[in-house]
Amino acid sequence: MQATDLIRPEHVIPHLAVPSKAALLQALSGEAAGRFGLDAEAVCAALCRREALGSTGVGDRVAIPHAPVAGLKRPFGLLARLDRPVAFEAIDGEPVDIVCLLLTSGGGGRASLDALACIARRLRVQDVRDRIRRAGDRREIHAALHEAG
């Protein structure tokens, strides 16, 4: 699986202003639900259940909230760059400014793990994160995520 399988240019949100982790999860749930005809509250509830197990803030100001959602046929991702970092209870204690929402089919399994690993590998690269933060628009953010650094 490649990052291009999960995040298309139209799945990038270059400017997202939210005051909190809860508001961020709600905003991303609404975006994802609108794109796939899902129930935004159900998506947000799934994300909150996952966050209750432990924060998906992976460090380096990055979070990858993820959850299985009934009704999806394949994994789906949204990448958002926040206008201002928000506290996310990340493992390093830093607020996040790059967030990749990952929704997978209700069955989970290998495809879910592959999708999560794919995104985590790309966002672990310092050059990728730096390019996303400097990018001027969604196309540049998308290119930063997908091109070799």
Image (cartoon, rainbow, N blue to C red):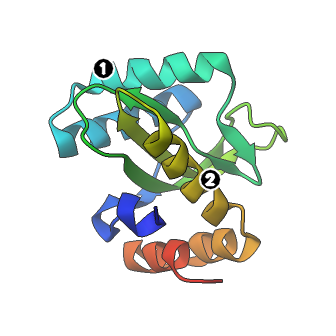
Most foreground residue, 46 or 90: 46
Question: Measuring 72% from the left and 69% from the top, which residue is drawn there?
Answer: 125
Q: Give the labeled residue for mark 1.
A: 41
- Name the amino acid, label 1: Glu
Q: Is residue 42 left or right of residue 149?
A: left
Q: Quadrant of residue 14?
A: bottom left
- Dot 1 lies on which element? helix
- Name the amino acid, label 2: Asp
Q: Residue furthest front?
A: 110
Question: Measuring 39% from the left and 72% from the top, which residue is drawn there?
Answer: 138
Most foreground residue, 142 or 83: 142
Q: Which mark is residue 97?
A: 2
Question: Measuring 42% from the left and 75% from the top, which residue is drawn there?
Answer: 137
Q: Is residue 12 visible?
A: no
Dot 2 crowding, Cα within 10 Å, few <14, some 14–19, many 20+: many
Q: Residue furthest left?
A: 37
Dot 2 or dot 1, earlier in sequence? 1
Q: Is residue 109 above or below residue 8?
A: above
Q: Residue 130, position in %: x, y?
A: 68, 73
Q: Is residue 25 visible?
A: yes
Q: Residue 144, position in %: x, y?
A: 54, 77
Q: Residue 68, position in %: x, y?
A: 41, 29
